[in-house]
Image (tube, rainbow, N blue to C red):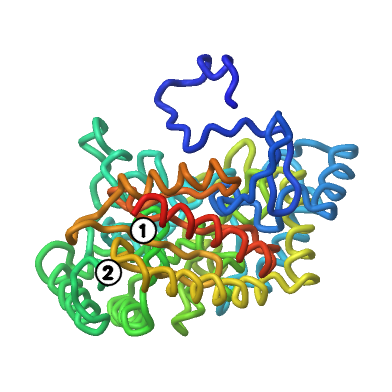
Amino acid sequence: MIGSNKSNLSPLLQQATDVHVDRGEGCYLFDTDGKQYLDFTAGIGVTSTGHCHPKVVAAAQEQIGKLIHGQYTTIMHKPIQDLSARLAEKMPGDIDSVFYASAGTEAAESAMRLMRHATGRPNIVVFHGGFHGRTMGSASMTTSGTAYTAGLQPIMGGVVVAPFPNAYRYGWSEDQATEFCLQELDYILQTISAPGDTAGMLIEPIQGEGGFIPANTKFMQGLRERCDKHGMLLGADEVQAGYGRTGKFWSHSHYDVQPDIVVTAKGLASGFPLSACAAPRKIMEKGLAGSQGGTYGGNVVACAAALATLDVIEEEGLVENAGAQGAHLKERLDRLADKDKGIGDVRGKGLMTGVEFQKDGKPDGDRAGKIAKECEKHGLLLLRCGPGKQVVRFLPPLVVTREQIDAGVDIFAKAVEATA
């Protein structure tokens, strides 16, 4: 249980569980009393290789013994050079230039800044339900919930919000929702932000905090077509959905589309704080001098951990495992949904799957919260998302096994039954 020292933390922090962790191993966390928890939160999708993967630990330990901090605009170090080369190989198209920061929100803001600098245009189009961070620029692009901007108004200007094809919310087919959203996007470009004033679009190919809502091929390719037509840039925020989680290395790859800018963080370094914004050099060099930098970005220990993370992902076939275990997870959750009318939707890709609860056609965050707490009692940790916290999200580490998926779903199924 959480100790009395919690009182020294900010009271604005909202604790999702009552677990006081002592250590982690693979897909498990152990509290200070030795109780084992199956962790399907992965630090909000961060510990992609599981807790304390031996190869990541060894790489970090070795680097700590040599150099802990080498600020990368002051000196250069080999881990950041090697990581940049490895990331360039993973990037789509001709993306070959990387800027590093510490958190996803910094990387998202750098993408916004780069779009404006590279095009000389002021406005950014984002999509309703998206989450890009909590700092001022990123919060101004975030519409997954009002908590991130409440009491902060007026926020940064130059951001235009377009609809996202959330077919379940609209109560339409995917085709109907997509057609509507593309038509509304065109209307926005005609009535709110002229193409000549629009630098680009930033989108989560699968929305995270907004409720684990995938886009689709027709919509994503429609964005690409409009960006190409009007000389705008397309940015993919892959912070939560990227890095193998969905069964492809990047979630936008499900839609056969290539963005101009990719933003990544979370699973990048298996828990060490590291984020990146990547673009082709011909775009990156259009940014203004001094517009990128930071004290801790590209930390040498984090880069060493990120290199080991890539090794583990490739050597252990974790992208393929995410696809296979994610398919099994969704199959089991779909069967559970057939038995419980309170489950309105099961959606996602790979090991990024959400279960939306509803009551009388309205989001049921209360029941979702009770289910998460019931699961915690029985050794399974889950988080919620969605504007009403009505979606229970499954984000296990990419090393998860079929047996662990089954164990987790068994606990979840009992919690669903107990709260019916």
Residue 116 place in picture, x, y as percent = 36, 57
According to the picture, the residue beneath numbered tag 1 turns out to be 211
**Location of residue 173 (image quadrant):** bottom left
Nearer-the-camera pick, 200 or 310: 310
- In the rendered view of the protein, which quadrant contains the C terminus? bottom left
Q: Left or right? Give the position of 360 relative to 320.
A: left
Residue 84 place in picture, x, y as percent = 70, 61
Residue 277 place in picture, x, y as percent = 54, 57
- Tag 2 or tag 1, which sits nearer the N-term? 2
Q: Left or right? Give the position of 290 relative to 344.
A: right
The residue sitting at the left extreme is: 191
Q: Left or right? Give the position of 265 relative to 82.
A: left
Residue 276 place in picture, x, y as percent = 58, 55
According to the picture, the residue beneath numbered tag 2 turns out to be 166
Work out whether 322 lies above or below 268.
Answer: below
Q: What element carries label 1?
A: loop
Q: Distance between the residues labelled 1 and 2?
A: 10 Å
The residue type indicated by label 1 comes to: Gly
The answer to whether mark 1 and mark 2 are in CB contact below 8 A is yes
Nearer-the-camera pick, 280 or 335: 335
Residue at the image position 24 percent from the left and 52 percent from the top? 158
Residue at the image position 24 percent from the left and 84 percent from the top? 175
The residue type indicated by label 2 comes to: Asn
Give the class, few, some or many, for how many residues have Cα within 10 Å of label 1's Cα (few <14, many ≥20). many
Mark sitting on residue 192: none
- In the rendered view of the protein, which quadrant contains the N terminus? top right
Work out whether 135 lies above or below 383.
Answer: above
